[in-house]
Image: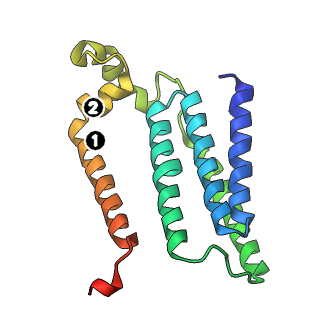
Amino acid sequence: MTLFDDYLLLLLAVVTALGAVFVRDLFSGVLTLAAYSFFLALLWAGLGAVDVAFTEAVVGAGLSTLFFLVALYLTSHQEEVRKQLPVRIMALGGLGILGFLLLFGSVDLPVVGDPKSLPSKHVSSHYLRKSLEETDTPNVVTAVLADYRGFDTLGETTVIFTAGIACWMLLRRRDDSAT
């Protein structure tokens, strides 16, 4: 992927995020959010973070879209139109302040690829040098998630599965005539 492709995907993600905020039809908003998650998944894959891309595709574009569509099926498709310009201006101002704080905090982050940064001095160097030898897994990220942190990954998977079952139980239709 070229730098132009990364910027194009980032631009598409920003445009779809803004479209999801300003669209009036809730069904269109759900589909726009699904497109946003899909563009982010492509962006993560292009940056080499395949595990994050897979999670974004499954949870963001897949399950979230499904849950939103089920919720829309059980409710109305139209948002109540209210004139709340001051609330929107306050929300956009709050987002601007949050963005500034995130950029301000990012100054202290280590430079990507710096071998003297704290993350590079910790256990990551061991994973990079010994993962193929110890796990026989060619992908370092897969080795860390499945072999070195297998129980942690299993716990995270269990939490996600439990949350999905809880959402399904809350959103399922009940036959009122059966009770």
Residue 168 vertical position relative to residue 41 in the rendered view, above or below: below
> Which residue is painted at 55% across and 70% down in the image?
72
Relative to 149, 99 lies left or right? right
Q: Amino acid at mark 2?
A: Ala
Residue 101 visible in rendering: no
Q: How is the image coloured?
A: rainbow
Packing grade of label 2 (10 A; few <14, some 14-19, many >=20) is some
Q: Nearer the viewer, residue 174 or 39?
A: 174
Q: Residue furthest top?
A: 133
Q: Position of residue 152 (x, y in %)?
A: 25, 43
Question: Mark 1 = which residue?
Answer: 153
Quadrant for the C terminus, please: bottom left
Residue 37 vertical position relative to residue 44 in the rendered view, above or below: below
Marks 2/1 in contact by CB < 8 Å: the verdict is yes
Question: Mark 2 = which residue?
Answer: 146
Relative to 49, 14 lies left or right? right
